[in-house]
Image: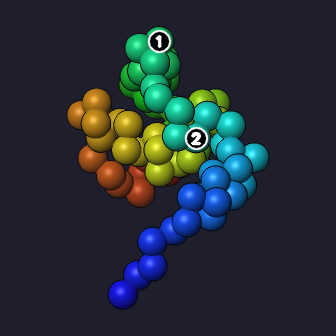
Amino acid sequence: MQQQESSSEYRDRLVEIRSKYTNAYFPWTIDSDAQLISMHQSGIGVLKLASHFCRQPSAIRSRLEKLRLESITSETEAG
């Protein structure tokens, strides 16, 4: 059985993640969505999008899925 993370452990983990991905877990804006759509449709890959938006690659994939722009494939990991 998995133990639930304490609030201090959660905060510590969030600080650690945000030290690398400064926009992690912040809400997406309409402008960011529009820019993500445009860049994705231009062929920019998940890793570059993650770097540009300061978010984890998994967050980019999730957002593209939510926006129904992409099914998860390894091809989207490239540059």
Please report the residue visible at 45 percent of the width from the left and 72 percent of the height from the top: 4
Q: Secondary structure at mark 2?
A: loop
Residue beneath disc 1: 31
Q: Secondary structure at mark 1?
A: helix
Please report the residue visible at 42 percent of the width from the left and 51 percent of the height from the top: 75
In the picture shown, does residue 7 fall above or below 28? below
Residue beneath disc 2: 24
Quadrant of the frame with the C terminus = top right
Question: Would residue 16 appear left or right of 43 to someone viewing this image?
Answer: right
Question: Would residue 27 appear left or right of 64 to someone viewing this image?
Answer: right
Q: Amino acid at mark 2?
A: Ala
Please identify the residue farthest to the right as the structure is shown.
19
Please identify the residue farthest to the bottom as the structure is shown.
1
Sooner in the amino-acid sequence: mark 1 or mark 2:
2
Residue 49 appears in the rendering: no
Q: Position of residue 73 (x, y in %)?
A: 35, 54
Question: Do callouts 1 and 2 mark residues in contact (Cβ within 8 Å)?
Answer: no
